[in-house]
Image (spheres, rainbow, N blue to C red):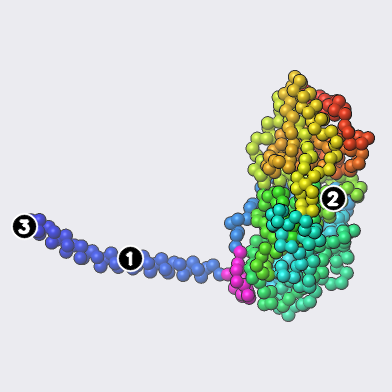
Amino acid sequence: MMAGRTTHSHSQRLRRLIPCVLVIVFVVHAVSFSLYLLLQSHHPSPNPAEPEPQTHERVRATSSQKPWPRLPSLLPWTADPSLPPRSCEAYFGNGFTRRVDVLPEGRGGGGWFRCHHSETLGSSICEGGRVRLDPALIAMSRGGEPIGQVMGRAEEDELPRYESGALEVEGVAAGRTGPLVEPGFLDAYVPANGIGMHTMRALLDSARVVPPGELHCSQWVEEPTLLVTRFEYANLFHTITDWYSAYVSSRVTNLPDRPNVVFVDGHCKAPLEQTWEALFSNVAYVKNFSGPVCFRHAVLSPLGYETALFRGLSESFSCEGASAQSLREKPDPQKTARLSEFGEMIIASFDLLDDGIYSSKTLNRLSVLFVRREDYLAHPRHSGKVESRLSNEQEVFSAVENWAKGQKCNITVVNGLFAHMSMKEQLRAILEASVVIGAHGAGLTHLVSATRDTKVLEIISSLYRRPHFALISHWKALEYHAINLPGSYAASADVIRELRNILKGLGC
């Protein structure tokens, strides 16, 4: 009987609790739903007064934007109108001191477009808001294919040819429509400068201003994006000029984070594309978009041919490398730390800036990096064979390696077969090197990432007497030595003699 009464009382209490529980659940859901509506009302669209017409997709990847790394050699990029033209800083830094407002920003919204012009370089970095690029109006190959699928494809098929309206910028209400730039603008601010196919100039020539509401897009990219056209995309020297132009463009336009990159070219995939992906936030090919793509903020990066790295090969200007610290204490427009800053940007993108490499370079261990030239398939028109700049390279390398083994100090000779090394491995080898040796070749362009105590020994064939790496060494304040050959054959004893003298200066 006692058990029966207990069971009955439990069931009565349970019946009384059920309505209370249901009321509590209802109240919690009601409060949650009210909070949801309240929060939604405080998060309007980016510009509620201007709905996006014909927008089927929207790219929002703010969380994927990479922040700028902390660079020890970073100096301000503020434009200084008093900067002397043709000074070192005007070539390598922010010489883009003249701002030209092509399409001013309107109070009622709409797009805008302006260019930052460098009198010294004779080129401009242009940027705009509410910009549309239509892949259907750009004649070229798709781009991004594996090289094996496009062998034999002509170079002209990979470079863009624009139809009118390939680039559009939304105008302001009751504003002008028609061509974006007036006659004479291109000659004044984007001159051809002897470049046979100036693709940025051609893109601006195709550009149109359209009325509000007529910027029809299949996709919006919310984050700042660089529009880049590459020419010699498989060559390290020329690619580094493209990287430098993209980096400078990002700094001059004061981008808060590392931008996206869209290749406005139809080149196939190449190993150096991985470094583009490391340096910047996201990388895409314009022809890979499904339809017209619109950008909240697009920046047109000048061609690599228009950078100081390339111009210095044919133009004479006074410029020498210095530490950022010395320039902070005593600014000098005829000195530069910009290549050191840029080199740090590259190595930081591979997480090598703070991993102890600098402190590991001691007198107890000297690394001699011998940069080699080897066969590799560079592009669809390439045979895979690399022209030798040092006819007895293997002989010289073996002789240096054997000589080093017999020295009292600890010398490691690194076989720099870069074509078979990842970019991170290449950069680590450069950073660890006390001495870099090599015949003239694009691999030596890695000197932009070398530490300031690195010594350089270039072996120069009489057929390739070019100043690329002597200049980079000078602009980086690296100690540079050269062996000028009467042909392409080097006596191993001469190379070892020069190397011995360099190592003596390092205490060996």
Disc 2 secondary structure class: helix
Q: Nearer the viewer, mark 3 or mark 1?
A: 3
CA gap between label 3 and label 1 equals 37 Å
Residue 194 appears in the picture as rendered:
yes
Q: Find out whether residue 52 is within the magenta segment.
A: yes
Q: Residue at x 51, y 70 (%)?
A: 41
Q: Amino acid at mark 2?
A: Phe
Taking depth in this image into account, of 112 and 66 the one nearest to the observer is: 66
Provide residue 167's location: percent of width, then percent of height: 75, 69
Badge 2 vs badge 3, beta-carbon distance below 8 Å: no
Q: Which residue is mark 3?
A: 1
Taking depth in this image into account, of 287 and 245 the one nearest to the observer is: 287
First in sequence: mark 2 or mark 3?
Answer: 3
Q: Nearer the viewer, mark 2 or mark 3?
A: 2
Q: Amino acid at mark 1?
A: Val
| Circle on res. 360 | none
Quarter that holds the N terminus: bottom left
For the record, the magenta segment spans 45-59
Q: Which residue is mark 1?
A: 25
